Amino acid sequence: MTGKTRIYLDHNATSPLRPEAAQAMLETLASSIGNPASMHSEGRAARALVERAREQVATLAGTSSREIVFTSGGTEAIAAALHGVCDRAPDRLRRIVVSTVEHSAVLTSAKAAAVKGFEVVRVPCDAEGRVDAGAFIDQLRRGTLLACLQWANNETGVIQPVEEVGRACRQAGVPFLVDAVQAAGKVELELWRVHADLAALSAHKLGGPQGVGALVVRDGIVLSPLISGGAQERRRRAGTPSVAALAGFGAAAVVAHDGWKDESERLLRLRAKIETRLRNLYPQVRFHGQASPRLGNTVNFALPEASGEVLVIALDLAGFAVSTGSACASGAVEPSHVIRAMGLDETEARGAVRVSLGWSTETADVDRFLEQLPQVVQQVREGTTDAV
């Protein structure tokens, strides 16, 4: 039995800092004092650390280091891609194609583009949360400026048909933006294979520090910078970078790249244990996206007569960190747009609970969660928990 006082099962929101990332950051904080833009020895040393991190992240992404633009995170990367493309769009290209289950970072930036006069086409998903590739490709008609599709969903773990859609985008001459934030470190992230022209990454989803990410920009794609004012990142993103944060990002990228296959298989076994136990305990349980290909670390489920929000609070009081879905939507009045897009009504959507596993999750953590879950569920159903 684990000796932890709390069990963290919310890796899709943020993953704890890996020891390798923490060590790289501490060493950098202790030794690096220069600005990477400076010409003196200290500046050149800092610049070397930044470029080393760039190489490490590029290896994770399966791309060239010259295509890596460091950002403050996945949200900025997505905003930089969408706004950067829209700002340079000719009058004949005014359509943006997205799916209804994209992360709010994509949907919010697309909404801002719509205010500027762009047509935003939202391709629906099926009841299992997967977008039909044919339906998406059918929207790549004349006048399309950009297509956006996430590699894997942050709430359900459902993997989207990015390779098929990317191939069609390349044939149609439509730039393709892939949100790879959740997929990084959980699948073989070869962006060239899915024909991505632009892709977003985030360090803290794979055990790096919060506040740093990357936008991958394929050679030949020109963007207007979202943040201007300096020559950093080849004039694609101004501002002095956090060298220590980038060192942590690079270290986490190395571990994620080298161990993704074994780690995915390990987490898949833990996910199977959770789903089997839930099914045995609650035959009426509903798993969201279970019939679709999914990341091995994500379980999104709903139990009859148990509010997802209340269950999450009750589990928190019992020592377990899980989620109702997207961390970016936590505290919002509206239920998950992803679950609603899958055809569920508001009540069903409010019942959704997400358990997401990661590098720090141990078998004992899952065993303890499954051991205490029935008592917590009973308390929620009877209204005897402090969370009610």
Image (tube, rainbow, N blue to C red):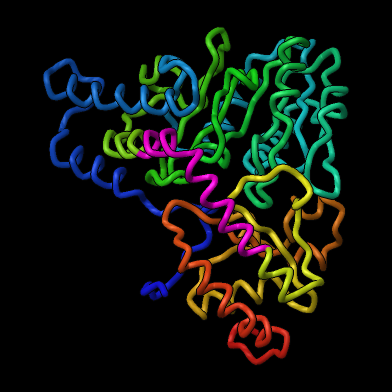
Residue 232 sits in quarter: top left
Image position, residue 266 (x, y; %): 51, 50
Up the image or down, 327 lies above or below 62; here it is: below
The part of the image, by quadrant, that contains residue 195 is top right
Q: Work out whether 207 lies above or below 212.
A: below
Query: Magenta region's main secondary structure?
Result: helix
Is 318 or 121 nearer to us in this picture? 318
Q: Decide if residue 168 is on the left or right side of residue 201.
A: right
Instruction: Return the x and y of residue 188 as percentages of the image width and height.
Output: 54, 31
Q: How many marks?
A: 0
> 218 left or right of 31?
right
Residue at 72% x, 90% y is 382
**Left or right of 332 in this view: 346:** right
Image: 209 above or below 109: below
Q: Residue at x 86, y 61 (%)?
A: 345
Q: Identify the image quadrant of the C terminus.
A: bottom right
User: x, y (%) of residue 101?
Assistant: 74, 43
- What's drawn in magenta, residue-wise? 252-275
Answer left or right for 166 relative to 36.
right
The residue located at (81%, 29%) in the rendering is 133
Along the line of sight, the residue nearer the viewer: 195 or 179: 195
Is 349 magenta? The answer is no
Q: Is residue 273 magenta?
A: yes
Residue under the point 44% across and 23% down = 69
Residue 29, percent across and down?
Answer: 19, 41
Looking at the rendering, in which quadrant would you find the N terminus? Answer: bottom left
